Amino acid sequence: MRTWKGALSLVGMLILCSCGYQIVGKETHVPPGIGSIAIPTFVNRTYEPGIEIPITQAFLQEFIQDRRVKVVARSEADSILEGVVRDFSLYSVSYDKAGLVLEYRTNAVVDLTLKKPTGAVIWEEKGFHESRWFRASTDTLINETNKNAAIQEIGRLMAGRIKNRFFYNF
């Protein structure tokens, strides 16, 4: 009797585990001939030093994790995604009773161009923007850390939106 219940339990678990789950939503609408992409470091045309690094890294990470196109060196790529960080601004948005800043809002604007290795433009996105806020601190190091975290989040959000556009709304 005990083996009968164990066997029945095993069969039940096998049935539940093999319900036919499969990955969906990996369909792409990328033009033929684009199987790889290079994402060189974006150009920084702002007064914010180093802003191009976390934004470029966010784009690299997004495309590497997706795996539908291979991220490769420029010399091996079917397409090249170039970016220019052309504007960065920082605004105080809320204050305490003493007039000290409680929160800042950051805005970044990027121009993106997807090109063939020949230089032919496949698509362009001018004025692509995103913004985030962060808590202010009287400690300069904490303030700078919070600002950098907001910039990284801006890059991640931009990269996700462009990746979706790249694969679905080309």
Image (cartoon, rainbow, N blue to C red):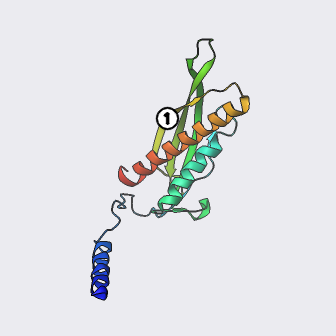
| Residue in view at x 49 percent, y 35 percent | 129
- From this view, report whether residue 121 is shown above or below residue 72: above
Q: Quadrant of the N terminus?
A: bottom left
Residue plotted at (47% across, 64% down)? 35
Based on the displayed image, in which of its 4 quarters is residue 149 positioned?
top right
Specify the quadrant of the image occupied by residue 86.
top right
Q: Position of residue 69 (x, y in %)?
A: 47, 62
SS at mark 1 in the image:
strand
Q: Is residue 43 left or right of residue 37?
A: right
Q: Seen from this angle, which residue lies furthest front?
A: 1
Q: Can you see residue 110?
A: yes
Residue 9, horizontal then vertical, whole percent: 30, 79
- Amino acid marked by disc 1: His
Q: Which residue is label 1 attached to?
A: 129
Specify the quadrant of the image occupied by residue 76. Answer: bottom right
Depth check, front residue: 113 or 105: 105
Circle 1 residues within 10 Å: few <14, some 14–19, many ≥20 = some
Q: Residue at x 62, y 26 (%)?
A: 136
Q: Name the residue nearer the viewer: 170 or 59.
A: 59
**Number of numbered callouts drawn:** 1
